Image: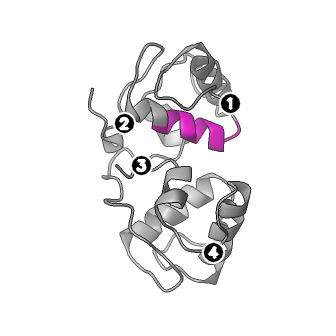
Amino acid sequence: MNNNISQCPLLKQGSSGASVKILQQRLAAAGFAPGSIDGIFGPMTRVAVVAFQKSEGLVQDGIVGRMTWTALGVNCNTPPVNNCPTLAQGSTGPAVTRLQGLLKTRGFYEGNIDGIFGPITRTAVINFQNTSKLLRDGIVGIQTWTALGVNCA
């Protein structure tokens, strides 16, 4: 199986690997308990997927395809942020745009998705870090990217 999340792999009960772990992290972050975040798509992950699909008005088949990935905040058309770059207030560029999109999907960011890491983005990062029980420093490193569901490996 291709573990590159930018491919938006088709996942269903019985699937396993890094993409399933990302799916489980994203479901948990969205408030849908997938069971253990272990990279194994078992019955509890399927129940969480179906509940998420229902909440988004999607077909409730328990199969994660492009529409479910997109609803989970994955952009299926662009590659993931490489190497999970460290971002802080003053950073700019595509990695900041992706960060803002991920934060917006989770309800932490209400500003424009403009690729500029300003005070509004910093506040959103701190609020997300607080909710995720991470160090609340407003700096996006591997732990924050991972909590946002990005595979940093």
Q: Are marks 3 and 2 in contact (CB under 8 Å)?
A: no
Distance between mark 1 and mark 2 Cα atoms: 21 Å
Residue 25 is one of the magenta-drawn residues: yes
Mark 2 element type: loop
Q: Earlier in the sequence, mark 4 or mark 2?
A: 2
Q: Earlier in the sequence, mark 1 or mark 4?
A: 1
Residue at far bottom of view? 90
Image point 63% across, 83% down: which residue? 119
Distance between mark 1 and mark 4 Cα atoms: 27 Å
Which three-letter amino acid code belongs to the residue tagged 3?
A: Asn
Which three-letter amino acid code belongs to the residue tagged 4?
A: Asp
Q: Of the residues tagged 3 and 1, which is closer to the observer?
A: 1
Question: Start and end of the magenta stretch?
Answer: 22-31
**Numbered badge on residue 33:** 1
Q: Earlier in the sequence, mark 3 or mark 4?
A: 3
Q: Are marks 1 and 2 in contact (CB under 8 Å)?
A: no
Mark 3 element type: loop
- Identify the residue position indicated by label 3 in the image: 75
Q: Earlier in the sequence, mark 1 or mark 2?
A: 2
**Residue 10: in sight, yes or no?**
yes
What secondary structure characterizes most of the magenta part? helix
Would residue 152 appear left or right of 99 to someone viewing this image?
A: left
- Percent across and percent down for residue 2 are 26, 32
Which class describes the residues within 10 Å of circle 1: few (<14), some (14-19), or many (20+)?
many
Give the quadrant of residue 126. bottom right
- Identify the residue position indicated by label 2 in the image: 8
Give the quadrant of residue 110. bottom right
Distance between mark 3 and mark 4 Cα atoms: 27 Å
Which three-letter amino acid code belongs to the residue tagged 1?
A: Ala
Q: How is the image coloured?
A: one colour
Image point 67% across, 54% down: which residue? 132
Distance between mark 3 and mark 1 Cα atoms: 22 Å
